Amino acid sequence: MFSVVDPNRPILGPKFYREAGIRAIMTNAYLLKRGRPGQLPKDVHGTLGFKETVATDSGAYQILEYGHVGVKPSEIVAYQEKIDTDIGVILDFPTGFHSDARRARWTVDETVRRADEALKRIKRKDILWVGPVQGGVHIKEVARSAVEMGKRPFSIYALGSPTELMEAQRFDVLVDMIVAAKKGLPHSRPLHLFGAGHPAMFPFIVALGCDLFDSAAYALYARTGRYLTSDGTQELAEIEEFSCLCKVCISITPEEMKRLDTSEREQLLSKHNLLACFSELRKIREAIRRGHLWDLLEHRAYANPAFKKFLAKIIEHSPLLERFTPTVKPRGISHFGEASDHRPEMVRYSVRRSRVPIERGKALVLLPGRWRRPYHEDPRNLPIVSKLANRSNVSICFYTIPFGPVPMELDETFPLAQTESFDSRDPIVYKQRAGQVTVWVKRLSPKQVFLVSEGEYGVALGKELSGGTMKFEVTRIQAKGSKPDRTVGSIIRRLG
Ligand SMILES: [Zn+2]
């Protein structure tokens, strides 16, 4: 993440960045140029007193806002080269939030035209050049822009995200925009999301495949007395205790901070806000290392209904996320309930299950998948499984809470044996899972079915299996009170 620095009004100094371990900042080439009329361009690292990575935005948005027409696209490229930027952005044409489809189309075409012109003018190949994707809220235009820009050799692509969307919490539109851009762009290049500066939304945009982003929010929010946290925004005026223990928050109480003069307060709040962003990034990176990013999304969804909607929209794109999720992770996953059904690993499992080769007309034994995994190693299942597994006319399937049906063939594949789940004892969940198991049973079209029934889930499954017109007979055996050896004995006796 780049912390955005106003070159003409820097709030935090290089010392703070150094101490906080912040190694990349972003500033605005246009504002830098405008703030130094008549001066020769000089190294931006020197100007800002920052030795590490400096990215410069072209200032297209400001130029649009101020209606400044005196800057040519080629000039901004040349200026960024002269100030020795590390990452530069070509002068694009932002679509903004209020453009209609026709206008959006025009901004996409104009940005492509400017990209071609910029690529001709670029002399410095040691600068990473960013190609912005336009289209605003017009998803078709975003898709078209991504494909067109993706054909051009930029080191980084960026999506202009209208700040209005984030302020209005229209995360649903944002999800569609990011997905449209990701689908059209080359996967080997990073994607930067402009202006996504609130830590609460970081896990969502990272899950969608945004590699880089920048935050001006830390400073903008500080200016109006707002304190950023991973769960949302708090008004300084309403805080009694700081929940954070960063060096700002341990050095002052909210009461004392409220009494400071405006600029001092703004500076301290900016520091805390920025540290809150970086703390969230650490949390995300750790979650990724553990393979637990989705858990973070589910957790965050409960911070605010708008985030719940954010996640619901992401779930619509689960198959896309599945494609980019590692097949095996260092740790197991957690299944908390309905939202977890859509996590990429679960989506993958249902696809895999549908691909398991099946032999019809066998006898099917349905066993309860309890907490012990792999399910066949459950001491109450093992004696049954070991006597039946080698019989060519029998297939075995476990009925489980997190996965519904688990055919024996998949019992030891990731993440089945490594998944922690919980049984909410909710009749609706039992019925829904029993329905999934029944679909699987029908697919096998077995000759006969033995249901080793346990608890309410077993009852629900028995009901589902006997409903409608089934072409097989179902034998129910109560797991409770019957020793596994006796259970398997009675199954073998009745095998046709
Ligand atoms: Zn703090």
Image (cartoon, helix red, strand yellow):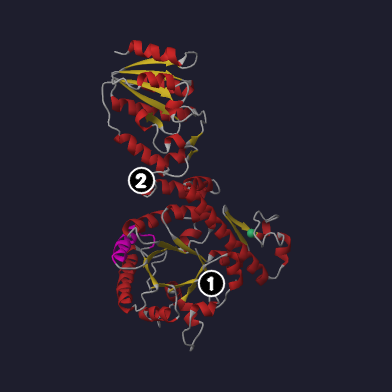
The amino acid pointed to by label 1 is: Val
**Magenta span dominant secondary structure:** helix
Q: Residue at x 37, y 54 (%)?
A: 179
In-front residue for pair 268/53:
53
Left or right, residue 267 beside residue 156:
right
Nearer-the-camera pick, 360 or 436: 360
| Residue for badge 1 | 5
262 relative to 403 in the view: left or right: right
Q: Which residue is mark 2?
A: 319
| Residue 41 on image: x %, y % | 46, 84
Crowd rating for badge 1 (residues with CA inside 10 Å; few <14, some 14–19, many 20+)? many
Mark 1 CB within 8 Å of ligand 1: no
> Residue 421, how many percent across, how many down?
49, 35
User: Closest to the observer: 438 or 306?
Assistant: 438
- Decide: few, some or many residues near mark 2? Use Cα within 10 Å; few <14, some 14-19, many ≥20: some
Residue 268 percent across, percent down from the top left: 65, 66
**Magenta part of the chain:** 136-151
Name the residue rendered at 42%, 53% in the picture.
Answer: 208
> Is residue 407 covered in magenta?
no
Assign the C terminus to one quadrant of the image: top left
Cα–Cα span, label 1 and label 2: 38 Å
Is 136 displayed left or right of 272 in the figure? left
Query: Is residue 378 something that shows in the picture?
Result: yes
